[in-house]
Image: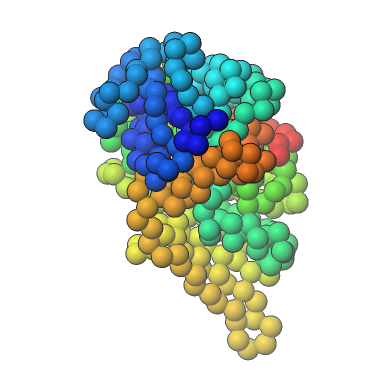
Amino acid sequence: MNDIIRLAFVGIDNPHGAGWRDLLLNFTDQARIVELCPGYDGTTYSLEERYADLPIRGDVDELLKEGEFDAAVVCLPNDQGPAAIKRLASHGKHVLCEKPIAASGSDAAGMCKAIKKSGVAFQSGYTWRYDDLATRLRRMIDEERFGKLIHIDMSMITSDVRRRGPDHYLFDAEQSQVGFFNWLGCHYLDLLFYLTSCKVVGVTARTGVFGAVDADVEDGGSILIDLDDGCLVTFTGGYWIPRWAGENRVTIRGSQRWAHWDPARKGTDGALEIHGPQPQWYAMEDDYELSPDDTPGYGGVRGVRLVQDWLDVIRGESKRCRNTPASTLATLKLLDAAYKSSSKGQRVACSIS
């Protein structure tokens, strides 16, 4: 392999496409975009001028036949992503893919099998696994500083359907197939596996269109999750804010301490409010903040760690990324259980880890 890893960028006009390209500019000494494959009906509306002279391939088959590259960043909608990734992996191309990759676990199964068979380096776009505060919470749980885990409460509320418009592909039942929880809620569902390392044994969900604008896919809802250690997880989220804005929060409650994580506290890159026991007269209270992050590109410093992890695996300097085919598939299976529960109106027993 060349000293500079040659990248193909597949899916130029993905909502996060420009963010990923800006992120890759942090790695010009290690990796460089050399091939383009537009996706999205061949559109290049958001392509930066610095890439205008690169070869543009009509589809992944043409890219594989005529392109010269080592790895691909894939940012395609659910109806295109799994097949494209399967083709790339089967031809020995390393893959970094924008989440959620697919609409269901069954759609992603063949892709994951191809990745495992080929042995290529795989990374998915779940950046919260690379967040310092998420890792600190994971360590607290591993070291049993919460005592017995009792309840994890997650919320993610963001801009309503009107911000992009109901005709946007994210709300298209043919391209995306499913809605909020697949595109955005997946971040926190994936994070749940990272934080706890527990198995999901039951899911009860209510998903649907609750906002004022009709959509072909769900705009949000609530999910109740049972973990195998007895912990109860609640997650409510949706496209419900009538402007470009977002609210995110995670609370973890245990028998010996509880903590609130605010990933978007103003003036920080996230904050933890930690409340501990009062063994005598003085209670444990802690407020831990991260300094503001001005790293350019999708996910900021978390994105940088994610890409570096992938490049290290490509070079053989590490065995696997923090996101794996198995972890990515587990998140899709959890989503499958939530949608099934909502459609049937009952709890779904499962075993997902």
Picture quadrant of residue 138? bottom right
Q: Let me know if residue 198 appears in the view.
A: yes
Q: Nearer the viewer, residue 77 or 180?
A: 77
In this rendering, the answer to whether 246 lies above or below 175 is below
Q: Residue at x 72, y 43 (%)?
A: 199
Q: Residue at x 71, y 59 (%)?
A: 142
Percent of width and height locating residue 61: 48, 11
Q: Residue at x 28, y 36 (%)?
A: 163
Q: Nearer the viewer, residue 121 or 40?
A: 121
Q: Nearer the viewer, residue 323 or 62?
A: 62
The image quadrant where one finds the N terminus is top right
Picture quadrant of residue 14? top left
Percent of width and height locating residue 352: 71, 36
Residue located farthest toward the front when viewing the structure as drawn: 2
In this rendering, the answer to whether 340 lies above or below 31 is above
Residue located farthest toward the bottom when viewing the structure as drawn: 281
Counting labels gives 0
The image quadrant where one finds the C terminus is top right
Q: Residue at x 60, y 60 (%)?
A: 137
In this rendering, the answer to whether 334 lies above or below 265 is above
Q: Nearer the viewer, residue 221 or 133?
A: 133
Q: Is residue 338 left or right of residue 292?
A: right
Q: Is residue 330 left or right of residue 242?
A: right
Percent of width and height locating residue 204: 62, 38
In this rendering, the answer to whether 334 lies above or below 266 is above
Q: Let me know if residue 321 appears in the view.
A: no
Percent of width and height locating residue 36: 38, 22
